[in-house]
Amino acid sequence: MKYYVGLLLVVLSSCGALFAQTKSQTDLSVPGEEHQKLNVLAGSWDVIVKIPVGQGKTVEGRSTCEAKWVMDNRFLRQEYSSVFGGKPLTVVRYLGYDRYKSEFIELQFESTHTDVMHNKGMISADGKTITSFGTAIDLASGREAHVRTLTTMIDANTFTLEMQYTDPISKETKTITLTHKRRKAERS
């Protein structure tokens, strides 16, 4: 009888450990406080785009951005629409947080090429700036470039996205800056 009681206790403690592990994994699979920090980026935006085109020269353009939560509030989908070089340009960017790896994830697709930017990053202690690192193809050189993005939440109606591309061969760095202003109908 003691044998069966001991065996039952071992089985029950194993089930408890299995339940605790499953609960922990479940907690990691749902959106957390890191996702809530991205809420300020959701909405409709008018965007001023500044692109370097030579030494000390910058071209300025305009875009719009519609940002909505997808995948049950796990990823923020930002869709940018503009005209670049006389042709329509669509950029889709996904921003989220991988709770298993404890890092922000950023994926970006553009309608003008097949390259995918994939960055990983962290948020500042004050919760206002996400800094991410990865690689993408620099369209000017056709080579892979190191990419650093800074998403800085200035206030409830303004944020910036800076993308810095560094060519590993030439060491040339260029920074594209997107300044987002919330559309007036949505302002806080």
Image (tube, rainbow, N blue to C red):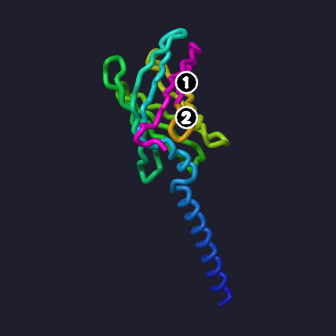
Task: Tell me the quarter of the picture where residue 7 sits.
Answer: bottom right
Q: Is residue 121 magenta?
A: no
Residue drawn at 56 percent across, 64 percent down: 23
Magenta region, residue range: 161-188
Q: Is residue 79 left or right of residue 148?
A: left
Q: Position of residue 57 (x, y in %)?
A: 51, 11
Q: Is residue 83 left or right of residue 37?
A: left
Q: Position of residue 149 (x, y in %)?
A: 55, 30
Near mark 1 (Cα within 10 A), the count class, few <14, some 14-19 or many ≥20, is some
Residue drawn at 64 percent across, 74 percent down: 13
Quadrant where the N terminus is found in the figure:
bottom right
Residue 161, placed above or below residue 60: below
- The kind of residue on which mark 2 rests is Thr
Residue drawn at 52 percent across, 56 percent down: 29
Q: Is residue 185 magenta?
A: yes
Q: Nearer the viewer, residue 5 or 29?
A: 29
User: Label 2, on which residue?
Assistant: 151
Q: Residue furthest bottom?
A: 1
Residue drawn at 59 percent across, 15 percent down: 171
Near mark 2 (Cα within 10 A), the count class, few <14, some 14-19 or many ≥20, is some
Q: Residue furthest top?
A: 55
Callout 1–callout 2 Cβ contact below 8 Å: no
Residue 177, placed above or below residue 5: above
User: Label 1, on which residue?
Assistant: 164
Q: Position of residue 111 (x, y in %)?
A: 35, 28
Q: Position of residue 47 (x, y in %)?
A: 44, 29
Q: Nearer the viewer, residue 123 or 60?
A: 60
**Considering the numbered disc 2 on the image, is that residue within a helix, a strand or a loop?**
strand
